[in-house]
Amino acid sequence: MYTPSSLPNTRVDAADILRGFAIGGIVLIHFLEHLNFYYFPELTALDETVWGIVFFWLANKMYAIFSLLFGFSFFVQHDNQAQKGKDFRPRFLWRMVLLALWGIFDLIFYNGDILLVYAACSLFVIPLIRQSNKVLFAAAIFFALQPIELVYIVLGLLNPELTPLYLGSNEDFGAIMPQQINGSFLEVAWVSLKHGIPVNFTWAIENGRFTQTIFLFIAGIILGRYRYLYDEGNNRQRWKKTMLYSLIGFAVFYPLYTYIPGMVDNVCASHSLGVMLKAWMNLCMMLFYVSGITWLYHCTKAGKKLIVIAPYGKMSLTNYMTQSIFGAMLFYGWGFGLYQHCGHTESLLLGIAFVGLQYLFCCWWLKSHKRGPFEELWRKATWI
């Protein structure tokens, strides 16, 4: 069974660096997508290249790092209270209610919000936080194996007429776009709330994101228990081995994802195989990023340069919320309507500039505050 850690959970700079790296990548992807508004001017060959490069290196990997660190933060908060003899689980449940409210607020601006999904996925993890390491590993493996897709592969092979899992995400998503073009702010806010809540959950389930998020939350708890992000014990060897094994894993899963689904005639099995292999391929790349950045920070002179990213990671919720507010203002019809003028190249440059402005704000704000504005509000409401 679980026992509280005997060591203090001091501030983990590597986690702040990783969180900053992840949220920066998420902002760039969202700007490239025009904040889930897939309407673009005529695209050039450079635009297509930019899209391919950014999505190859960042898409799904940045969200995965963010999710992993969400589970890690849950462990730290719970363990800190457990060391004092307190049970943090009821408080964390309340914290997730607050996160859901943040998500609803975020949906007013950006219909691709992930905070509501995080709040729902956390309900699967709360009962596991005090379980033994064996139970945690078993649960992590179960969700990592994409159980929904496994079921659909079996059902598809038994019934060739079966179609892939589809819960109606396209209809909800399609209902939002017309308002993004011509609607007022209030009209876009209403349609985003009406259709954004179901579309985020249905899309996450259809594409294996829901179960993968639960897996990453659990993996983050395991990360915390084994103090993987601290420079202690044999962690330096662990980071090197993780980098090596993740590269090997990517070298295996990339060609499998590229070719195997297309070789399967069964439509349902082919689709589910694609979802599974893509998730595992991206997981390998994410692990390479996490282990590589942690190793660079703790073991090389690059650590002094990487630490400058930490302020951006410390204010990840503020940065996530503000990218929704200002990104929607930039691209949607009720704002500046830049969707009409910005191809992928211009959108990426805008994203880089916006991340730079966010970073400068973070550095300025943290000179006189311990936390970002959204982080401080969330914390005060958590302990109200």
Image (spheres, rainbow, N blue to C red):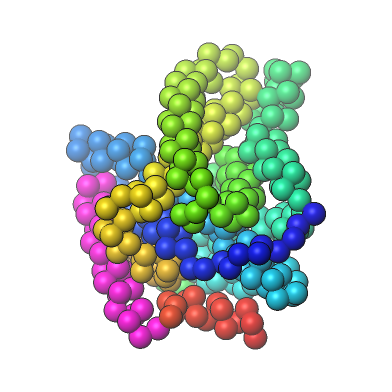
Count of all numbered marks drawn on residues in the image: 0
| Residue 191 vertical placement versus 261 (above, below) | below
Q: Nearer the viewer, residue 76 or 346?
A: 76
Q: Give coordinates of residue 230: x percent, y percent.
A: 49, 56
Horizontal side, residue 92 vs residue 289: left or right: right
Horizontal side, residue 43 vs residue 373: left or right: left
Q: Give coordinates of residue 89: x percent, y percent.
A: 73, 68
Residue at position x 54%, y 29% in the image: 277
Q: Which quarter of the figure has residue 17?
A: bottom left
Q: Give coordinates of residue 167: x percent, y percent.
A: 65, 43
Q: Nearer the viewer, residue 89 or 264?
A: 89
Identity of the residue furthest to the front in this view: 233
Q: Which quarter of the figure has residue 55?
A: top left
Q: Nearer the viewer, residue 339 or 63?
A: 63
| Residue 178 vertical placement versus 255 (above, below) | below
| Residue 158 vertical placement versus 18 (above, below) | above
Residue at position x 60%, y 44% in the image: 212
Dominant SS of magenta comes to helix
Q: Is residue 142 visible?
A: yes
Asked if the magenta segment contains residue 78, the reply would be: no
| Residue 220 vertical placement versus 160 (above, below) | below
Horizontal side, residue 364 vs residue 282: left or right: left
Q: Give coordinates of residue 210: x percent, y percent.
A: 62, 47
Residue at position x 43%, y 80% in the image: 370
Residue at position x 80%, y 54% in the image: 1
| Magenta-colored span | 344-369
Quadrant for the C terminus in the image: bottom right
Asked if the magenta segment contains residue 348, the reply would be: yes
Q: Is residue 31 visible?
A: no
